[in-house]
Image (cartoon, rainbow, N blue to C red):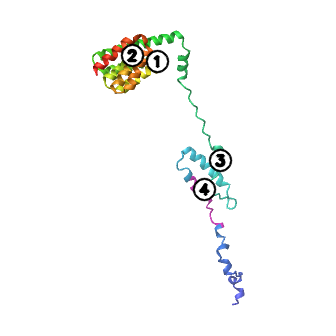
Amino acid sequence: MNTQDNPQNSQPKTDPLIYHHPQVDESFLHGPSKLDEVFECLDNIMNANKTDSSKETKKTSFSSAASNVTDTNFLVCSKPIICRSSVRRSKPKKVPLNTNQFTFMRQIDCDPEDRILAREQREVTAETFRRMGNFEYRKMRFDSAVAFYTKGLEYIKDTPVLYVNRAICYIKMREFKRSIMDCDYVINHIDEQYLRAWLYRAAAYKRLNDEPNFEASIYQAKRENYTEHEYIDDFVDKMRSLL
């Protein structure tokens, strides 16, 4: 039998080197597309922590995108595309108004009569604490007396009586520097001629063995109160007799 009559041998022969080369193997074009699986995997990753409603919305968007993508018109991006319109800007926080402004303005705009009445009420309260402090002082409970005088100063700060009463308590408690501070406050801020402030200041410096400041305090006491020289000398003699 002639080989030319065999139909199997009638097909043209191909070059085996070209037929088996991997770059010319286009058999993948006839297989199922993998894009649907890729988009489904992306949907599962992006919707893992979202609610059911957001899942349905995003699945619809990816499904519509996948339906329009073929094997020849897809685009691969290295970065995700972010829709700027979906980004919400944070609203500026409102700064609360000063809630104490109204109260402050009421205190400024109050009538002079109201201020006088408030002052009188505070003086009555401070006087009550002064009497309670004097009672404790006579009982030689100097700590309690200091506490009452200090409480009275919370209501009235421009009265010299509470300061000098507290100063003599500090002298009794041997807290001489604190006594000098109270006396100096009276002299520098309230009444520079206040006699008891000068005398208690002199007594505190005397117990600190500070003779220059002691002599200066007595001198200023006589200078500011020239009609009280006899009383000042008597105070100095009694103070020296107690040392």
Query: In this rendering, does residue 214 appear at all?
Result: yes
Mark 2 and mark 4: span between their CA atoms? 96 Å
Predominant secondary structure, magenta span:
helix
Q: Local crowd at mark 1 within 10 Å, few (<14), some, or many (≥20)?
A: some
For discs 1 and 4, the disc positioned in front in the rendered view: 1
**Element marked by disc 2:** helix
| Label drawn at residue 39 | 4
Instruction: Out of 64 and 209, give the one closest to the viewer.
Output: 209
Q: CA distance from mark 3 to mark 1?
A: 72 Å
Give the alpha-carbon distance from disc 3 to disc 2, as whole Å. Answer: 83 Å
Would you place residue 190 above or below residue 30 in this image? above
Q: In this picture, which residue range is highlighted in magenta? A: 29-43
Question: In this orientation, which residue lies closer to the viewer: 187 or 42?
Answer: 187
- For the residues labelled 3 and 4, the Cα–Cα distance comes to 19 Å
Check disc 2 and report the residue beneath it. Answer: 196
Q: Is residue 159 visible?
A: no
- Which amino acid type corresponds to the residue marked 1 in the rendered image? Ile
Q: Going from the N terminus, do you reach mark 3 or mark 1 first?
A: 3
Q: Which residue is mark 3?
A: 83
Precedes in sequence: disc 2 or disc 4 = 4
Q: Which of the 4 image quadrants contains residue 120?
A: top left
Disc ID at residue 114: none
